[in-house]
Image: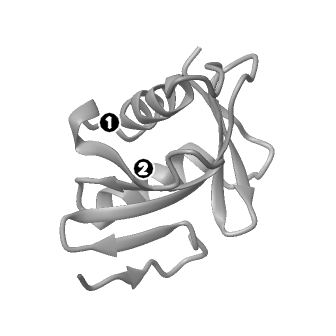
Amino acid sequence: MTQAAVPGGMPYLRGSAQGVELTVHVQPGASREEIVGTHGDALKVRVDARAVEGAANGALVEFLAHALGVPRREVRILRGEKARRKVLAVTMPIQDATARLARLLGVESTERVGKK
């Protein structure tokens, strides 16, 4: 599988044979679901579900599918099921993922994107 980093300052996004791989740092048990920027080389995402019996993983997949505008079945966890740092596969063109994430994050790092 060939992976290519995305130019333009998105170290958490990589191209893959099936679409993109997204590295995220998850904060479970938050008061709301939102993308809050970056955490090192990962995209930081808060989800309201607790990290109990996979609830936070399910909430993360659902939230990212909604945020990226793809069906839930197109987002799956590749690595890190039991860790805060996860790598997810998203079936969508790299150009669409890059544009969507750029819009979600905006130009200001203080801008937050939430579902609620």
Compare residues 112 and 44 and report the one nearer the observer. Answer: 44
- Please indicate whether residue 108 sits to the left or right of residue 26 in the image: right
- Please indicate whether residue 112 sits to the left or right of residue 78 in the image: right
Q: Is mark 2 on a helix, strand or loop?
A: helix
Q: Residue, x 50% and y 28% (percent of image)?
A: 54
Q: Can residue 106 be seen from the camera position used here?
A: no
**Residue highlighted by disc 2:** 100
Q: Are marks 2 and 1 in contact (CB under 8 Å)?
A: yes
Figure check: 85 above or below 73: below
Outermost residue, right direction? Answer: 110
| Quarter of the image that includes the C terminus | top right
- Please indicate whether residue 82 sits to the left or right of residue 16 in the image: right
Compare residues 10 and 78 and report the one nearer the observer. Answer: 78
Residue 10 tag number: none
Q: Residue, x 63% and y 28% (percent of image)?
A: 51
Asked which quadrant contains residue 38, the reply is bottom right
Q: Earlier in the sequence, mark 2 or mark 1?
A: 1
Figure check: 18 above or below 102: below
Q: Residue, x 51% and y 48% (percent of image)?
A: 103
**Percent from the top left, x then y, of residue 87?**
47, 58
**Percent from the top left, x then y, of residue 59?**
49, 25
Residue 69 tag number: 1
